Image: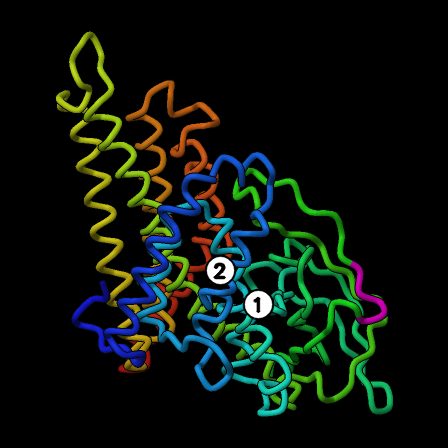
Amino acid sequence: MADPAITPEVGDHDFRDILEATREFVRSVVMPRELEIMNANRIPDDIREQTKAMGLFGYAIPQQWGGLGLNIAQDVELAMELGYTTLALRSMFGTNNGIAGQVLVGFGTEDQKARWLGDIASGDVVASFALTEPGAGSNPAGLRTKAIRDGDTWVISGSKQYITNAPTANLFIVFARTRPADDDGPGIAVFLVPADAAGVEVGAKDAKMGQEGAWTADVSLDGVRVGDDALVGGAVDVGYRAAMTSLARGRIHIAALSVGAAQRALDESVSYAATATQGGTPIGTFQLVQAMIADMQTGVMAGRALVHDAARMWLTDEDRRIAPSTAKLFCTEMVGRVADLAVQVHGGAGYMRDVPVERIYRDVRLLRLYEGTSEIQRLIIGGGLVKAAQRKV
């Protein structure tokens, strides 16, 4: 249930129904098939179709464009439910609702929204956020992909790396440099590039440590031509701001996802400790095991409170920079510690591939990397606080 301190835009009754349906779907449909998803490295088609029918491909897209219209406070409640199972489920529609879809929601022209958002919300179009490059990860200022004006078209060339949902994408939200950074801005624009455009090539699926079923791949753009209608917002300097805003909002979502995964690891550990025995005694009666569980519970509760606070400050426009980074930093680091403790509580069983905490341990490691690494979050937080203090002097 949503935090009573947060007033949602979608009615309370409707949102409770959405949240309850998602919880039931996660626990009765997806969780029993987690091993199937992990071993096959794909989300089954029937699960994908169910998520489309539930509106999950567009839960954060405004209702006027065919989505469910959840605000960020409701988004985080949903994310905590989605984080309770394999993170590949959320990844399947995460870019539609998050870093890719929000670029269009926040910065697209009316024509661009009308052209794409309905299909994105329905799941008929998978939108992919093509920002990261071999030489530009958490800091978009290092972008080397170029967009050059040629008559009435733009020609885009460059390489993107680790692009989520690239193998299934219909639309790439491509960030490219139109000029070197100068006093007028960073010179980064963002373009809507159909996946079937000439010159777009998607590489083989990446082999990753975890999150089986969540596909990423390299994307190369070799002289890809698009018109002015593909320039998001119709302005060349929209790109950097769109990226930063979309990433900041996404950080709160990732923090909530982390809380959901940590809660699952905690629940698995408590259940195991209550039933597994050592010398005929349930291990949950051992004080050192209880201490590990206590640390896990403390982290989960602190993370949940921080996520709620960051979401509230986003909604009120009180803080859309430091609070998202703080929530993302704490919660993604927290879930790593919780997952490690969960494996420890399970002992040797926790190292076995068919045990949920083993998968969680591998899955959550990525959360400290995307939407900006923990190191980047520390720079945003520390630098932001110092600059705020200097402005008061």
Q: Are marks 2 and 1 in contact (CB under 8 Å)?
A: yes
Q: Is residue 336 magenta?
A: no
Kind of element beneath mark 2: helix
| Image spot of residue 15 (x, y percent) | 30, 71
The disc at residue 51 is 2
| Residue closer to the observer: 169 or 129 | 169
| Residue closer to the observer: 19 or 210 | 19
Q: CA distance from mark 2 to mark 1?
A: 9 Å
Q: Which residue is mark 1?
A: 123
Quadrant where the C terminus sits is bottom left
Kind of element beneath mark 1: loop
Using the rendered view, name the quadrant where residue 176 is placed. Answer: bottom right
Q: What amino acid is found at the position of numbered circle 2 in the picture?
A: Thr
Q: Vertical placement of 200 versus 65: above or below?
A: above
Chain part drawn in magenta:
197-201
The disc at residue 347 is none
Q: What amino acid is found at the position of numbered circle 1 in the picture?
A: Gly
**Dot 1 crowding, Cα within 10 Å, few <14, some 14–19, many 20+:** many
**Dot 2 crowding, Cα within 10 Å, few <14, some 14–19, many 20+:** many
| Image spot of residue 145 (x, y percent) | 73, 68
Residue drawn where x is 21% and y is 53% of the image: 302
Residue drawn where x is 69% and y is 67% of the image: 170
> Can residue 183 be seen by looking at this rendering?
no
Q: Vertical placement of 118 versus 290: above or below?
A: below
Horizontal side of residue 73 vs 88, given as left or right: left
